[in-house]
Amino acid sequence: MDNFKLRFYNNFIADERWRYIVNGLSVTIRVTFFAALIGIAIGFVVAIIRSTYDKTGHLKVPNFLCEIYLTLIRGTPVVVQLLIIYFIVFGTVKIDKAFVAIVAFGLNSGAYVAEIVRSGIMSIDDGQFEAGRSLGFNYVQTMVYIITPQAFKNILPALANEFIVLLKETSVAGYIALQDLTKGGDIIRGRTFDAFMPLLTVAIIYLVMVMGMTAGVTRLERRLRNSDH
Amino acid sequence: MTTDSTLIKVINLEKHFAGGKVKALDGISTEMRKGEVVVVIGPSGSGKSTFLRCLNLLEVPTGGSILFENEDLTDRNVDINRHRQKMGMVFQHFNLFPHMTILRNMTIAPIKLQGKSPEEAEKYAMTLLERVGLGHRAGAYPSQLSGGQKQRVAIVRALCMKPEVMLFDEPTSALDPEMVGEVLDVMKSLARESMTMVVVTHEMGFAREVSDRVLFMDEGIIYEEGTPEQIFNNSQRIRTKEFLSKVL
């Protein structure tokens, strides 16, 4: 027992090492949150371009660019993308690492969000589209007022899952020496030569966050099922 | 010649699919006068729905022209959205917006497209809803309504834009038999108020009773046309007679 107390003291209290965990957690949450926002923005734009092309054959060139983006992002590991953006794209400028991580994970997430949103848009009956157009709405207005609100409702669970994955994926941010939650725990391990406590603490924090988000998604799904409209 | 009372003039309208192999519409010419009720009948696959959907360009014609208020809708430079605001459309499957209340279904287009204030749009929508006996369902969602109620809402949703013409695409075909009457009643009262209407339907009773003119379509052309009296009681052509003998 005394041994446990001593290890706890060494890992978290001495030299205020708990700060690595707390600060790391705040970085992880910030990066995840803003990357998710970027992912949603990119995802909706790409999805609308792609489904417009699917439905009407318009936007051929933008659709082609979107396809290149999707292929590149989904065809390479996120760590490699992160390293490329840090060392090559922003290689010559001094820049906040958290910003780089937000850009990299946002760009990555956007590709996955795009395909989720596109499946949502394509799942809406063509009659909805025709009803909107017949009232005099143009293509974009029909998308904004009629199609995407319905699509969004259908894809909310899949979208929430994507952000759970995103939260866990940000744990590779240590590759560019960004001190996120994982890196924070690893730094403590390096100082104390005690892997057990810091790494398990990190794991438990991720687990609690993921379980919280999952519980949120489950409740959301139930609410959406109940409201039939 | 286009006379003053002509609202829609269709000239040699064509709709070909698959590079011309399938001719859904093969040269249709006719016109609809203001206040006229035109019913389009014909066997399935005759092109009658395609014809109706071409009138507001939901289907893009591959040839010919459609003059609406003397403007050619098939002209690429025409703002079709502006004209569609004046052409209400009612679909077989209602196509109400399921994520909006009945009232919102009816007011979103007048508010967003005609710049109406929400109060003004809602007041007019409520008047129309009351008239079709659904004032008490204004706050409900489409999924809470019966088929007949949905279609009545779909009709008044289109009317909220104060259209010049109403296009009906088999408005009663997806309804249970006991609900057909309530929808036809709404359409009859519209006809009495001299709304211009183009109706694709299998309801021969409605065609007979309400229409000013009947178009019988077959194989992508208007095979025969005339007053209900001429078509139903005194048809001159063989395929019209055959069709009517099957459905009457």
Image (cartoon, coloured by chain):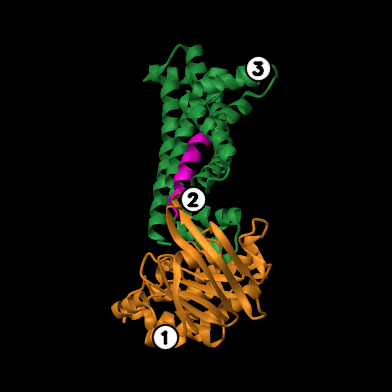
For label 3, the residue is A91
Chain to which mark 1 belongs: B
CA neighbours of label 3 inside 10 A, class few (<14), some (14 to 19), many (20+):
few
* Pointers 2 and 3 within a single chain: yes
- Residue A115 sits inside the magenta stretch: yes
Q: Please state the extent of the stretch shown in magenta in the rendering.
A: A109-124
- Residue B175 sits inside the magenta stretch: no
Q: Which amino acid does label 1 sit on?
A: Arg
Secondary element at tag 1 = helix
* Pointers 2 and 1 within a single chain: no
CA neighbours of label 1 inside 10 A, class few (<14), some (14 to 19), many (20+):
some
For label 2, the residue is A152
Q: The orange chain is which one?
A: B
* Residue B243 left/right relative to B231: left
- Residue B216 in the image: state x and y as whole percent: 42, 75
Q: Nearer the viewer, residue B74 or B209?
A: B74
Snapshot quadrant of residue B181: bottom left
